[in-house]
Amino acid sequence: MARVDLKNVTKDWGTAKAIDDISLSLENGEFAAVLGPSGCGKSTTLFMLAGIYLPTSGDILFDGARVNDVEARDRNVGIVFQSYALYPNMTVLQNITFPLRFKEISRADAERSAREIAELVEIEGLLDRRPNQLSGGQQQRVALARALVKKPNLLLLDEPLSNLDATLRLSMRTEIRRLQRELGVTTVLVTHDQIEAMTMADRIVCMNQGRIEQEGTPEALYSRPETVFAASFIGSPPMNLLAGEASDGGIKVGEAVLDTAGDVPPGAVKVGIRPEHITVNGEGVQAEILIAEPLGRETLYTARSVLGTTRFLEPTSVPRFKVGDQVRLGFEPEHTILFDGNHDRRLEGVRAHV
Amino acid sequence: MRASSTRRQASNFAIFLGPALAFLVALLVVPIAVDLVVAFTDMAQTVTVDEFTTKQFKKIVRVSDDSLLGFELRGSFYRALTLTAIFVFFTLSIFNVTFGLVLALTTTALPDRLGAFFRAVWLLPRMAPSVVYALLWIWVIDPTERGLLNQVLVNLFGLEPVNMKLDHPMTVIVLSNGFIGASIGMLILTSSIRSIPQHLFYAARADGAGSLSIIRHVVMPALRWPLSYITVFQTLALLVSFEYIFLIMGPSRSTMTMAMLAYTKTLAPSIGSGLYAYGAAITLILIVIGMVIALLLYRLTNMKSLLAQPRIEVH
């Protein structure tokens, strides 16, 4: 277990900047998720923590000690890969004991630790199998066991759930979280799936184009996104973001003018409102339903109004409205978020309502 | 209805497989059949068959009635058998497999461009015409002080010049065939190493493995099948190869392998050629040896288990 710090880390691939000056601290035992779209630098960050890539500049510290020059094999880091990367020629037991071969541990002790960890991830019946005789979920567990058997300082999970089917993903999510709590190992999960990040991690680090957009608890990222990117990337269905122009008289969005609370500086702004924070048939503007999508527990509508096209959620499993129906849409003002239209950053202490 | 569909099947078979079958028969089956027939005749310089006989094989197993000539033929056959075994074993084990593996491992460990450069260098002899390649070797091992090897030995190390052709003939043919043969192994093994998922290397490094452990536990297991393939394929190729031996050494008795013997006794002009039936008999023996070796290696390398069905259980 270790405390992990990244200090002003950058990574260049030739002239391309993969990681652009990121700093990050992880407490001992913390579970952090690095979330972002493909190519945002999240896997690069992970591989730098593992010692597989070297940072171009900046420092990586484990428990306060600089590890930039420490080779991957000496960092005592466990990794679970998206492809699981099990050794195809070895049995499950040999796969799990493989990391212990390079430590001064007797064969018997290594085998005992492997069996203990196998029991923990519930694969004790599969130890004599080879990876090609296992299902995806089983391979996943073997990969976890192999990463955990050496009692790593740091556990790195690289999109570990993306090759599993939906049900299995749900159970592995809880499983990994349980294991991490039980063992108290500092963990970094890399994912492009915001639900994975939200459900599993204590803290989310949202990355975009090699930079950290925002970090914080899942709740904070959801309810107080600092940037337009974080607002649009987190939440499913995504937040409505309406481009407008602020002046003394309010914010002009489309053909409508929104009232404001607080001091909105004049100029371009974006008004953000999540689909579940749109009120229906109260005060508001006239809108026409374009699409109705039943999601099971609720229904997602897409509607057109003077504001433009907006999405809203209704907590009914059977759609209340049909395509073509007329409704009145309003905003819950306390849930509106305004962004500076030029820098895409959140404006503090301001609200808008229809 | 049924009759027409059967006819259709037959015509499809003829159209799609016919050309390939004709090709196989004409180029692979017919020569072996001809060889089989000729081996049991007395065909010689006149290219006529007077009788069907097993006397070609008798020449090999015991001193025949043709006394002196028969004695000579028997001697050269057993000598050829030994030289072939030495030639195939050393070329294969030192160069085609081991050196090919070393080249593949080192060139894939280098940065991409540098690795590709070295691989290209090793491919050059294969791209050059064989006569040019052979001429270069003849120049390298020239016994006078003009030879490259002797220039190095004499000028750099102050040693006596050596006559490789005379004193180490087998070394010459093993080296010359090995330098060219290693490139096939190198290419096949390089592509096999490249096809190992990158994550497996990352996983091994994170698990604490050093370079040698990675080669042993990640790379070598992935090369089992290509190594078996190279061994089988190159054994068969070397058994019948005589091109470079002939070009560099000529019909020298010191490097008269089975394939060389069959060639010089039949088709080589002006060096005792024309013993067609005898050459065919040797070739037939060579074919049988090749088949036995191929089957043995197939068993030894356990290719069957490499094709085992996975047992997958989904839960």
Image: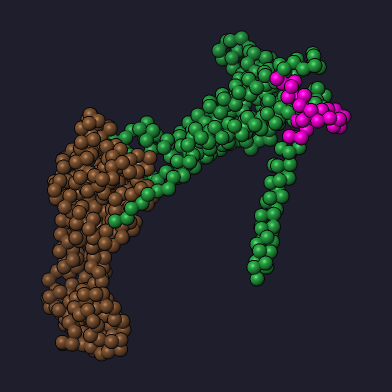
Chain colours: A brown, B green
- Figure quadrant of the N terminus of chain A: top left
Tell me residue A46's x, y (percent): 27, 48
Tell me residue B74's x, y (percent): 72, 18
- Residue B202 against residue B169 in the figure, above or below: below
- Residue A152 against residue B102 in the figure, above or below: below
Q: Determine whether, in the image, residue B131 is placed left or right of residue A242.
A: right
Q: Let me know if residue B157 is in the magenta part.
A: no
Q: Nearer the viewer, residue B97 or A303?
A: B97
- Residue A166 against residue B144 in the figure, above or below: below
Q: Nearer the viewer, residue B208 or B27?
A: B27
Tell me residue A102's x, y (percent): 27, 32
Q: Let me know if residue B47 is in the magenta part.
A: yes
Q: Determine whether, in the image, residue A66 is placed left or right of residue A19.
A: left
Q: Determine whether, in the image, residue B248 is placed left or right of residue A305.
A: right
Q: Nearer the viewer, residue A117 or A247?
A: A117
**Magenta stretch bounds:** B35-61
Which quadrant holds residue B92? top right
Tell me residue A281's x, y (percent): 18, 87
- Figure quadrant of the C terminus of chain A: bottom left
Residue B5 visible, this angle: yes
Residue sitting at 73 percent across and 34 percent down? Answer: B36
Residue sitting at 77 percent across and 17 percent down? Answer: B64
Looking at the rendered structure, the number of numbered marks drawn on it comes to 0
Residue sitting at 19 percent across and 76 percent down? Answer: A276
Q: Nearer the viewer, residue B231 or B48?
A: B48
Residue sitting at 16 percent across and 87 percent down? Answer: A283
Query: Please, which residue is most extreme toward the front here?
Result: B2
Residue B119 visible, this angle: no
Which quadrant holds residue A205? bottom left
